[in-house]
Amino acid sequence: MLDIGFDTVFLDDDNNAMVILDQTQLPGKTQYLSLKTKEEIWNAIYKLQVRGAPAIGIAAAFGIYISVKGSSAGTYDSFYEEFAEVKKYLSSSRPTAVNLFWALDRMDDCVKRHKDRSVSEIKQALLKESNKILEEDIKVCRKIGENGLSLLKPGMGLLTHCNAGTLATGKYGTALSPIYLGQEKGYRFKVYADETRPLLQGARLTTWELNQAGVDVTLICDNMASIVMKNGWIHAVVVGCDRVAANGDTANKIGTSGVAVLAKRYGIPFYVLGPTSTIDMQAKTGRDIRIEQRPGEEIYKEWYSKPMAPEGIKTYNPAFDVTDAEDITAIVTEKGIAYPPYTESLCQFF
Ligand code: MRU
């Protein structure tokens, strides 16, 4: 597999801090941050210094370990009380990506499984579990890449939205994983990256990481997806996901559902790629998925040297939207590819 050349989220050598590549500084600066407190970790997730559903999950797992590592609790009950408080706190950082809750629940199960051990042994078990979550994610992403590549042909033009690459995962990404794998095999894909307003994950992050890997990538504004499809340049759309409901409705970065509608209009396959940990069988449909609302300043201020709208203007800034299952050609996971009807096909993974 291609040498990606950077790591998104990991523990430092002494397991005393969680280290993240600060994604708000990209593409200008490659700066790593060392986070040691639960407040720093919460902030990093909230501010999208670490972002993307699987990476948020990994950060939450490392984050809860780092936060309780220094606990002076002497009994299981007092340790668990502290752990549960941090879990609740970190759970409140972002609502939509289910991986955050999935990873924290997994760490919770780990504590409970070791109930009859000493507090220091429980801490060791948590360290091991968090590293396992990272290692598993890397393997899962690689497998998603292999399954995704089976749907693609050399030379294809691919459109992607937001960033579902290495920066959003342990390594390789979900939607970008088949692109990396294809690059290794000489597939010469032509990738079009939507800029992804308002936080510009496509412009700042997807083009940065694909460009570094030598992939042919072209940046377009979000409102140019239609023209590149009409021009015949797009043969498939590949996107990630933050939460997939049991019926296949999929929450992903705001703007994704519009791309899916366009793809259907032009007869282009629309593929969602993600780990089975992003499938939430408790959510029956997209209506059960909570959509994060973010400050309006992100739309008109944050990325500009001066405000691009009148001060105090009314805004609506949902961070995600839900793509209807009927607009999705297939959902690609590490366990296989699901096709409609998703109510039946997603069950095979659980
Ligand atoms: O707000 P973000 O940047 O965390 O949103 C990220 C996305 O929407 C990604 O497409 C999704 O998390 C999949 S990442 C493999």
Image (tube, rainbow, N blue to C red):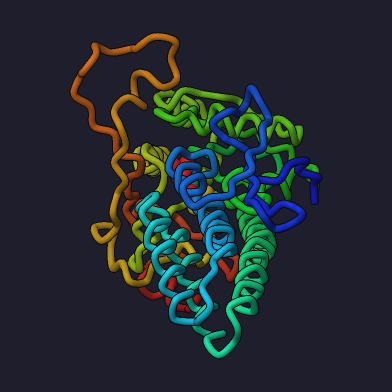
Using the rendered view, name the quadrant where residue 63 is placed.
Answer: bottom right
Q: Residue 330: x and y, percent?
A: 48, 58
Q: Relative to 75, does residue 97 appear above or below in the rendering?
A: above
Q: Nearer the viewer, residue 136 or 341?
A: 136
Q: Relative to 93, does residue 156 appear above or below in the rendering?
A: above
Q: Is residue 12 left or right of residue 254?
A: right
Q: Relative to 48, does residue 207 appear above or below in the rendering?
A: above
Q: Nearer the viewer, residue 11 or 205?
A: 11
Residue plotted at (43% across, 53% down): 242
Using the rendered view, name the quadrant where residue 30 is placed.
Answer: top right
Q: Is residue 111 left or right of residue 13?
A: left
For the question of whether residue 268 can be seen, the reply is no
Residue plotted at (72% across, 51% down): 12
For the question of whether residue 237 can be seen, the reply is yes
Number of callouts:
0
Q: Nearer the viewer, residue 16 or 10?
A: 16
Q: Nearer the viewer, residue 264 or 72?
A: 72
Which residue is at the far left? 314
Q: Residue 146: x and y, percent?
A: 68, 59
Q: Residue 24: x and y, percent?
A: 54, 31
Q: Relative to 108, does residue 97 appear above or below in the rendering?
A: above
Residue plotted at (40% across, 60% down): 244
Which residue is at the far bottom? 116
Residue plotted at (41% across, 38% down): 266
Q: Residue 29: x and y, percent?
A: 66, 25
